[in-house]
């Protein structure tokens, strides 16, 4: 158990979807997720026993101000640097998945050892996608090229093609495909963990509000249990790719808010 006075955890919105390769909408997500979190539809208690509404270590740091689509990397990285240097760990809300790269650039400066648990339908390892090396299909290629983590473990994957398989081999990514689900053994980490959670890792039956609906995914319960069972400190997380334009009767906004609670509760332990 970590000394609870050592660090705080802040919610940080990144309303940015300029690198979406298919449909826009995730820029609307942070505001809508906050609305659910602050509504009367749920309480502040997480399943692991922390009440976010009573915790002095949990706060909302607002949104990252992104000056232009070309400055998104430095804008996000600098804001994360400011907060991490004040001993505040981050739960960021995308935005499309391109935001994970600058967040992790910042994290790598503050954490010498880091494993990434990446939950997603897609491996997001394209060298370039539709001419954009910072596309939401590419962030983990950039992360691995820059050596921002010790280990990348992917869960929920069900969209691999030959190029992605080559990238997995090149970067020695542990990509655990849904066709082999459930996991043969529990995930065991040896370093602090950063969680990158793409909502489309969850089956569209639970999470219709995504740009790329890919059937055959994880259940909500399976994802929550994966998060709860992380065996090392969870020091950072992003929840990305919720697209409110594709949601049905707030199903996915409620789901995203639940995931914020459970991730925050785990981070605060
Ligand atoms: Mn995805």
Image (tube, rainbow, N blue to C red):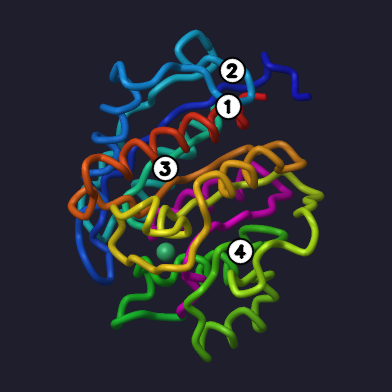
Instruction: Judge from the rendering whether residue 166 lies leftward or rightward of residue 43; answer left or right.
Output: right
Q: Secondary structure at mark 2?
A: loop
Residue indicated by mark 4: 154
Q: Is residue 158 magenta?
A: no
| Residue at image location 61% in from the left, 50% down from the top | 108
Query: Is residue 98 visible to the viewer in this orientation of the structure?
Result: yes
Determine whether the beta carbon of the residue marked 2 sits less than 8 angstroms from the nearest atom of ligand 1.
no
Query: Dot 3: few (<14), some (14–19), or many (≥20) neighbours within 10 Å?
Result: some
Q: Earlier in the sequence, mark 1 or mark 3?
A: 3
Q: Quadrant of the N terminus?
A: top right
- Residue furthest to the bottom in view is 162
Q: CA distance from mark 2 to mark 1?
A: 6 Å
Looking at the image, residue 98 lies above or below residue 242:
below
Residue indicated by mark 2: 50
Query: Dot 2: few (<14), some (14–19), or many (≥20) neighbours within 10 Å?
Result: some
Q: Secondary structure at mark 3?
A: helix
Residue indicated by mark 1: 265
Residue nearest the viewer, comparing 90 with 118: 118
Determine whether the beta carbon of the residue marked 3 sits less than 8 angstroms from the nearest atom of ligand 1.
no
Instruction: Judge from the rendering whether residue 8 lies leftward or rightward of residue 230; answer left or right.
Output: left
Residue indicated by mark 3: 78
Q: Earlier in the sequence, mark 4 or mark 2?
A: 2
């Amino acid at each position: 158990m970590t000394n609870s006075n050592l660090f705080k955890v802040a919610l940080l919105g990144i309303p940015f979807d300029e690198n979406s390769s298919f449909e826009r909408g995730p820029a609307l997500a942070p505001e809508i997720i906050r609305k659910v979190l602050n509504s009367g539809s749920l309480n502040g208690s997480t399943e692991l026993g922390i009440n976010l509404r009573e915790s002095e270590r949990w706060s909302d740091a607002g949104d990252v101000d992104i000056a232009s689509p070309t400055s998104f990397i430095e804008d996000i990285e600098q804001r994360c640097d400011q907060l991490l240097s004040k001993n505040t760990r981050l739960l960021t809300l995308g935005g499309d998945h391109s935001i994970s790269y600058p967040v992790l650039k910042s994290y790598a400066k503050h954490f010498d050892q880091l494993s990434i648990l990446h939950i997603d339908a897609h491996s997001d390892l394209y060298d370039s996608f539709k001419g954009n090396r910072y596309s939401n299909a590419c962030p983990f290629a950039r992360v691995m090229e820059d050596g921002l983590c010790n280990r990348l473990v992917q869960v929920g994957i069900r969209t691999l093609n030959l190029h992605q398989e080559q990238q997995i081999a090149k970067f020695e990514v542990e990509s655990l495909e849904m066709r082999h689900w459930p996991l043969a053994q529990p995930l065991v980490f040896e370093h602090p963990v950063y969680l990158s959670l793409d909502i489309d890792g969850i089956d569209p039956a639970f999470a219709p509000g995504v740009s790329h609906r890919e059937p055959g995914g994880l259940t909500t319960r399976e994802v929550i249990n994966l998060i709860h069972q992380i065996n090392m400190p969870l020091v950072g997380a992003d929840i990305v790719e919720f697209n409110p334009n594709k949601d049905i009767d707030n199903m996915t906004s409620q789901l995203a808010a639940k995931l914020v609670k459970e991730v925050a509760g785990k981070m605060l332990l």
